């Protein structure tokens, strides 16, 4: 391996930090590396694994403005590994957001985090809640050959070259980027058409928009999705002909919002609602479907099946937690990030476009989340879903699950205790001959050995464990969303 240090940063976090999401497996990284010809410590890198695995990370440098850091506040850091001809290179970079630049210049936090009052922000800012830093730390996709990082509260989409990690600045979309609201995390790439689908949300009517970006990177469609009030959606889905947006009964309590307090409530009696809109449809074309009250962080995929739209995603059995008598706010905070507390289960909704009715079913009783599929079948009927198993009590992943939704099989791999993986997208092998013909790729944080690795699994046999393990220059923080871009997708 050849390792070059690109830049070192200085942490302004407390010296004896105790925060559970800034220590241990979430300890932020301060060094940016370029590493080539990474050491393979076990197995091998398959020669038909060609492309880039990217993972975004909340990687804070400054103490929160009121000392109440939430792991979704941290500055975005991208970790990227590139595979070619059985070899691997690694680079990591902070996403050079305008917010990070301003805080680096001042040497302290300027904006309040999600657990803090927006009034404490020293400057105006971004986000559906408003006055937050756009940390661009939630999600990453590759569209038109360019990596786009995004922020769950809406913001700019920051562009980076997925190979070189060169910072290309915010997306402009031919001058039509919706600067007033920004764009939510979980933009969707349709590999078949090359389009990028997205939504945004905020506190002003119509409260949501949906849009389409052409394969060339120009905004070509942008329509209101009118909602009854401000909502907190996180993900969307699409089929070959339709897009699906959501309105869940968890949102800021309207009475408290009038006092500028952002306190989410679960309105248990209010149905969940799903908007089905033709890909280039107008507001008038929206067909709404009602379903069991819940909240969904992540969808796996959707597809059309005759008159029905089939949507797979993670239904939450217990989506919002309130302070129990005698409970400390820290305990509540920890519970709110635990998929076992949220009871996230793989779920299937069927929306019948003829009758307007919804059917739904639980696909697995186990609590898993962060679903991925082979991107080549996005929007079309999928058979396999690969998800992460949560470490009880934490926002950490301690295993992987492969669901065969047609054959009914279920494979599982558990990492050794103290070893945590990332969201693990499916990477089809070059000239793949089927949906399951490829690999799962993940970054691993190993607290036992104080190292990180990239691990490669056979997507058709994940229970056999990694078939290749590649050493990274240092132990990296756990993170959030990841993306696989095949060599063909890097060309743009
Ligand atoms: Fe997400």
Image (cartoon, rainbow, N blue to C red):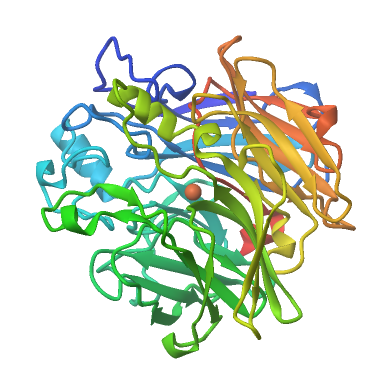
Front-most of residues 488 and 264: 264
In terms of image quadrants, where is residue 254? bottom left
* Left or right: 92, with 437 as reference point: left
Residue 448 position, x and y percent, is 60, 9
Front-most of residues 107 and 62: 62
Residue 127 position, x and y percent, is 27, 55
Front-most of residues 477 and 127: 127
Vertical order, 217 against 77 (above or below): below
Vertical order, 242 against 480 (above or below): below
* Left or right: 259, with 274 as reference point: left
Q: Quadrant of the C terminus?
A: bottom right
**At 81% across and 40% down in the image, what residue appears?**
410
Residue 120 position, x and y percent, is 11, 41
Vertical order, 35 against 168 (above or below): above
* Left or right: 477, with 115 as reference point: right
Residue 469 position, x and y percent, is 73, 26
**At 13% across and 44% down in the image, what residue appears?**
121
Q: In which quarter of the image is the N terminus?
A: top right
Vertical order, 355 against 111 (above or below): below
* Left or right: 51, with 325 as reference point: right
Q: Can residue 370 be seen in this snapshot? A: no
How many marks can you see? 0
In terms of image quadrants, where is residue 68? top left
Front-most of residues 473 and 354: 354
**At 55% across and 39% down in the image, what residue appears?**
343
Q: Can residue 233 be seen in this snapshot? A: yes
């Amino acid at each position: 391996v050849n390792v070059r240090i690109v830049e070192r940063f200085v942490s302004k976090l407390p010296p004896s930090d105790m925060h559970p999401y800034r220590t241990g497996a979430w300890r932020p990284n301060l060094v940016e590396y370029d590493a080539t010809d990474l050491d393979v410590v076990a197995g091998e890198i398959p020669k038909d694994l060609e492309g880039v695995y990217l993972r975004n990370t909340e990687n804070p440098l400054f103490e929160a403005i009121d000392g109440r850091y939430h792991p979704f506040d941290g500055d975005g850091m991208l970790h990227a590994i590139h595979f070619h001809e059985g070899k691997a290179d690694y680079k990591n970079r902070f996403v050079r957001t305008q917010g990070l630049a301003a805080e680096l210049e001042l040497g302290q936090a300027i904006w309040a985090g999600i657990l803090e009052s927006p009034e404490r922000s020293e400057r105006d800012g971004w986000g559906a809640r408003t006055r937050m830093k756009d940390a661009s730390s939630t999600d990453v996709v590759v569209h038109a050959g360019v990596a786009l990082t995004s922020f769950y509260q809406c913001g700019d989409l920051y562009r980076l070259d997925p190979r070189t990690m060169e910072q290309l600045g915010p997306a402009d979309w031919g001058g039509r980027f919706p600067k007033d609201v920004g764009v939510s995390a979980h933009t969707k790439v349709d590999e078949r058409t090359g389009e990028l689908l997205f939504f945004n949300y905020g506190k002003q009517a119509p409260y949501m928009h949906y849009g389409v970006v052409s394969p060339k990177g120009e905004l070509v469609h942008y329509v209101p999705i009118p909602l009854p009030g401000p909502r907190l959606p996180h993900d969307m889905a699409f089929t070959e002909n339709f897009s699906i947006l959501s309105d869940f009964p968890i949102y800021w309590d309207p009475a408290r919002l009038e006092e500028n307090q952002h306190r989410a409530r679960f309105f248990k009696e209010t149905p969940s609602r799903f908007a089905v809109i033709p890909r280039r449809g107008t507001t008038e074309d929206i067909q709404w479907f009602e379903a069991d009250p819940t909240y969904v962080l992540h969808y796996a995929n959707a597809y059309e099946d005759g008159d029905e739209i089939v949507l797979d995603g993670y239904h939450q059995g217990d989506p919002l937690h309130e302070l129990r008598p005698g409970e400390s706010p820290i305990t509540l905070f920890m519970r709110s990030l635990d998929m076992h507390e949220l009871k996230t289960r793989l779920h299937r909704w069927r929306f019948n476009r003829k009758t307007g009715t919804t059917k739904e079913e639980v696909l697995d009783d186990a609590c898993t989340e962060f679903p991925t599929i082979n991107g080549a079948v996005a929007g079309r009927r999928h058979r396999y879903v690969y998800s992460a198993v949560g470490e009880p009590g934490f926002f950490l992943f301690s295993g992987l699950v492969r669901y065969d939704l047609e054959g009914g099989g279920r494979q599982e791999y558990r990492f050794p205790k103290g070893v945590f993986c990332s969201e693990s997208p499916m990477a089809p092998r070059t000239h793949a001959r089927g949906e399951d013909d490829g690999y799962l790729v993940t970054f691993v944080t190993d607290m036992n050995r104080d190292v990180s690795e990239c691990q490669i699994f056979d997507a058709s046999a994940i229970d056999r464990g990694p078939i290749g393990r590649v050493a990274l220059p240092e132990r990296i923080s756990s993170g959030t969303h990841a993306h696989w871009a095949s060599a063909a997708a890097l060309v743009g």
